[in-house]
């Protein structure tokens, strides 16, 4: 691509609910601009920006894709994003890199849950927006209903610029409300015609609404509007540009990406009205310094995505905010305080990469094989180590236990997971309190994609299952127990004999003391007794879970001058503990989570009933940012699949977070099942 300047750069993300046609729209835009030689298809797996095998098999985007083209003196870089909630991380990454967003809406479905979600993400970044009402050729397409939903959801700043002519099979073109003419498509080409008589009244009312919206962005225009003066097309265009840039106006366009209607007009409007990298102004650092988009300024860039490949290695996506970055140079990772060597810089066009010698302020590009840099890091100079705020991602909530499928996968699993985590900011791998390795993701589809990639890209096949609940065991009663271990051999034998007292110790963990008098157990054997108690407690006595919150006191015993040793007393103490626990009213404890559920008010009844069905106790209700917040205590055993089930229950509008609050006794009938399962596992292992 030709060298350019920030005032000519338009960085735009396509965002939407899944299935609205973002990738098809991006494909049509790239084709119309001459950036790709043929028009690919998402359904056929030939779309330029859906090139990963996972995407081609599923027929929808999983990762963000980048494509660029030049038109009317502007370079437009499109960042296509996934629409499904499980892959929202890439939407967050894309919005961190761009200066505006095109919200794509399905004309037959209107404003959907994903539309609300991506709109809120764009609000968080304060990004200017346009709306493209897509699929006007689809059965049940209803532009008026969709426009009404947009206004109801996002307010009066929604301003229709184009109106469709016809719908479904009869959709054939649009009316330009600003320039007041119609365009009819025939054989893929638009032809300007007069506005149809039956649509003239609608066009006039929509033009009036557009003028009202545009007047909000211009005091001068507002005055003329209030005084009833005529407003020219040029004045509307100027106000439209100003309003789009500051977010007070959201222009609405129509078309069909599938039939390539309205697409080249959208390209023209992006070039005219989307703010350039120079117009959006600077970004603020963590210490409130302003970074201006000046190519001659000091170098600053932010990393917004990392991909890991077993052959190419790490590919780091970045947006240059100030200054310029040259190939074969060195930069300073201000976030981590480390030097990084920059190799060959790349411009991205789907899966294709174009080498470039330099990236200037406003440009989006990539570089391979950075060693310490992670998503969200700031790259700058050591002399001016500015740091931008990190990119904030949604927290993962779906937990599955993972294990290698075979022994050969065991060796590959660790490195593969590490590489996977480099490119998945919304996934975590942890060791659970139950001793299992667990993968925490956004949802079922996210988990499935990760496991498929681990096998396809890194050769590590892993199996997933529901995690074990990290139960605990404790006692409710007080008792005394005897443990005696005696073993005679040809030489020295083994002899240990202890009496211990067990009692509850709520919240105090495991406490060991001794009250031996008269030397019945010599002091040198006390460590063996304590070790036997602690090791047995860690393994569990009743159901194989750690025994805690009890006090064990060694108060008597006996020894043999020749055969006693520390190991003998360790075994004797273990025997005493196992016997004593059975006599001290053992119970099973389960983790109780403090849960916050955020939902629209219409789902309050269903969600409350569902929480009650999960043995939850609702502790309170509140409202925040237009959502209802339910606070509850819920057993962890009931939450492993809650992320998926809450999404189903609320149509994707509900989210939750959970943290460990305390442990409570498991109801008797459930405890019996857990203990029975443990005994079954023991029997099978033997």
Image (tube, helix red, strand yellow):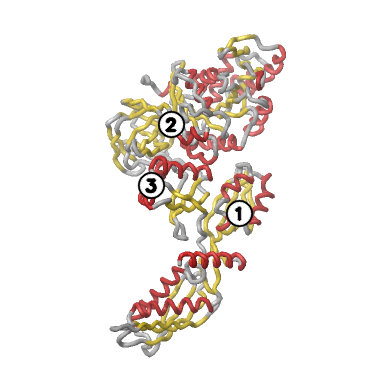
Q: Which of the two discs, 1 and 3, labels the residue nearer the N terminus?
A: 3
Asked if residue 226 shows in the view, the reply is no
Residue in front for this viewpoint, 495 or 89: 495
Q: Taking 85 as reference, is 5 left or right?
A: left
Q: Where the C terminus falls, by quadrant?
A: bottom left
Residue at coordinates 46% horizontally, 65% vertically from top-left? 685
Q: Is residue 662 visible?
A: yes
Compute the Cα span from label 2 to label 1: 39 Å
Whichever of callouts 2 and 1 sits on the residue coming sooner in the sequence is 2
Q: Are marks 1 and 3 in contact (CB under 8 Å)?
A: no
Assess whether mark 1 and mark 2 are in contact (beta carbons under 8 angstroms).
Answer: no
For residue 679, the mark is none
Left or right of residue 110, residue 506 in this image: left
Residue drawn at (29%, 32%) of the image: 343
Q: Quadrant of residue 76?
A: top left
Asked whether the residues under the numbered discs 3 and 2 touch, taking CB atoms below 8 Å apart as contact, a structural biologist would say no
Q: Which residue is mark 2?
A: 282
Total residue callouts:
3
To which residue does mark 1 refer?
Answer: 631
Horizontal side of 307 relative to 627 (left or right) equals left
Q: Which residue is mark 3?
A: 418
Q: Quadrant of the N terminus?
A: top left
Taking the spot 35% from the left edge, 39% from the top edge, the residue there is: 310
The secondary element bearing badge 1 is classed as: strand
Helix, strand or loop at mark 3: helix
């Amino acid at each position: 691509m030709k060298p350019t300047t920030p005032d000519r750069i338009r960085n735009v993300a396509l965002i939407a609910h899944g299935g609205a046609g973002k990738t098809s729209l991006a494909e049509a835009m790239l084709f119309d601009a001459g950036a790709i030689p043929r028009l690919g298809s998402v359904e056929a797996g030939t779309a330029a920006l859906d090139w990963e095998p996972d995407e081609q098999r599923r027929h929808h985007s999983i990762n963000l894709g980048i494509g660029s083209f030049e038109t009317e003196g502007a370079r437009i870089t499109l960042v296509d994003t996934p629409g499904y909630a499980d892959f929202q991380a890439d939407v967050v990454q894309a919005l961190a890199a761009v200066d505006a967003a095109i919200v794509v809406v399905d004309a037959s479905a209107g404003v959907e849950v994903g539309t609300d979600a991506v709109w809120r993400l764009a609000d968080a970044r304060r990004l200017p927006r346009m709306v493209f009402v897509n699929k006007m050729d689809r059965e049940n397409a209803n532009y008026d209903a969709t426009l009404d939903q947009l206004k109801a959801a996002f307010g009066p700043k929604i301003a229709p610029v184009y109106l469709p002519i016809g719908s479904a099979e009869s959709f054939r073109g649009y009316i330009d409300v600003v320039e007041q003419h119609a365009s009819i498509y025939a054989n893929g080409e638009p032809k300007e015609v007069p506005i149809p008589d039956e649509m003239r009244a609608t066009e006039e009312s929509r033009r009036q609404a557009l003028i009202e919206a545009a007047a909000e962005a211009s005091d001068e225009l507002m005055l003329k509007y209030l005084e009833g003066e005529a407003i020219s097309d040029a004045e509307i265009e100027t106000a439209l540009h100003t309003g789009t840039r500051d977010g007070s106006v959201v222009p609405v366009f129509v078309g069909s990406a599938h039939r390539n209607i309205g697409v080249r007009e959208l390209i023209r409007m992006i070039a005219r009205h989307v703010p350039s990298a120079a117009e959006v102004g600077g970004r603020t650092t963590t210490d409130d310094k302003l970074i201006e988009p000046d190519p001659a300024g000091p170098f600053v860039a932010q990393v917004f995505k990392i991909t890991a490949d077993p052959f190419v290695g790490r590919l780091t996506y970045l947006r240059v905010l100030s200054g310029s970055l040259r190939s074969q140079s060195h930069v300073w990772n201000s976030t981590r305080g480390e030097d990084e060597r920059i190799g060959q810089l790349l411009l991205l066009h789907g899966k294709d990469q174009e080498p470039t010698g330099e990236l200037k302020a406003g440009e989006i590009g990539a570089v391979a094989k950075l060693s310490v840099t992670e998503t969200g890091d700031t790259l700058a100079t050591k002399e001016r180590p500015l740091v931008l705020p990190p990119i904030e991602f949604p927290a993962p909530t779906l937990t599955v236990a993972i294990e290698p499928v075979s022994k050969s996968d065991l060796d590959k699993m660790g490195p593969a997971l590490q590489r996977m985590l480099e490119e998945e900011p919304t996934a975590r791998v942890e060791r659970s309190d139950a001793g299992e390795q667990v993968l925490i993701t956004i949802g079922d589809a996210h988990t499935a994609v990760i496991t498929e990639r681990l096998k396809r890209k890194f050769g590590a096949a892993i199996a997933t299952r529901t995690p074990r609940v990290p139960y605990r065991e404790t006692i409710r009663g007080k008792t005394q127990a005897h443990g005696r271990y005696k073993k005679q051999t040809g030489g020295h034998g083994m002899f240990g004999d202890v009496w211990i007292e067990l009692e509850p110790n709520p919240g105090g963990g495991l406490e060991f003391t001794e009250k031996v008098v008269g030397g019945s157990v010599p002091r040198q054997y006390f460590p063996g007794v304590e070790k036997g108690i602690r090791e047995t407690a860690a393994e569990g006595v009743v159901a194989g879970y750690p025994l805690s919150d009890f006090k064990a006191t060694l108060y008597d015993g006996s020894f043999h001058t020749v055969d006693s040793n520390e190991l003998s007393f360790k075994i004797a103490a273990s025997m005493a503990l196992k016997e004593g626990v059975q006599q001290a009213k053992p119970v099973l404890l389960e983790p109780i989570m403090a849960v916050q559920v955020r939902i629209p008010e219409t789902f309050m009844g269903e969600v409350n009933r569902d929480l009650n069905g999960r043995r939850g106790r609702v502790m309170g209700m509140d409202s925040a940012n237009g959502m209802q917040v339910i606070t509850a205590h819920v057993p962890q055993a009931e939450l492993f699949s809650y992320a998926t089930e809450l999404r189903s229950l609320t149509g994707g509008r509900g989210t939750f977070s959970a943290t460990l609050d305390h442990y409570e006794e498991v109801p008797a009938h459930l405890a019996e099942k857990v203990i029975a399962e443990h005994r079954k596992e023991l029997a099978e292992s033997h």
